[in-house]
Amino acid sequence: MNKYEVMFIAKPLEDAEVDPIAEFVSNLIKKNGGNVEKVDRWGKRHLAYPVKKQADGNYVLINFEADPAVIKEIDRVMKIQDDILKHLIVKIDE
């Protein structure tokens, strides 16, 4: 298994409303055979430019281990989530 991190920007909701979104992504990773190492919530930040007509967003960073074949499925599911404005999955080199 390789190490990855996924950074996503959720809609500018209250902090308590962002927790279920982070939990959804964590469960998605676990359901596809991955192992979540750390979930880091950065909080609400102002975006450099509007994304989907939103000027602010809640940043969340998740470090995890997974097989390379799982990444496509995680990416596909995150793209269709309405509460996630943007996301990026990056492989971490050791």
Image (spheres, grey):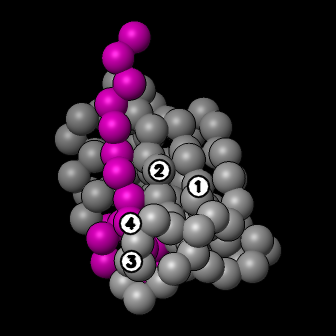
Where 69 falls versus 3 (above or below)?
below
Tag 3: amino acid: Val
Question: Mark 4 Cα within 10 Å, few/some/many (few <14, many 20+)?
Answer: some
- The answer to whether residue 89 is magenta is yes
- Residue at label 1? 60
Which residue reaches farthest front? Answer: 48
**Which mark is first along the chain, 4 or 1?**
1
Residue depicted at 68% across the width and 53% down the height? 41
In which quadrant will I find the N terminus?
A: top left
Q: Earlier in the sequence, mark 1 or mark 2?
A: 2
Query: What's the mark number on residue 7?
Result: 2
Of marks 1 and 3, which one's residue comes earlier in the chain? 3
Read off the residue under disc 4.
Answer: 86
Tag on residue 51? 3
Whether residues under marks 4 and 2 lie with C-beta atoms below 8 angstroms apart, the answer is: no
Kindly identify which numbered label has been placed on residue 26: none
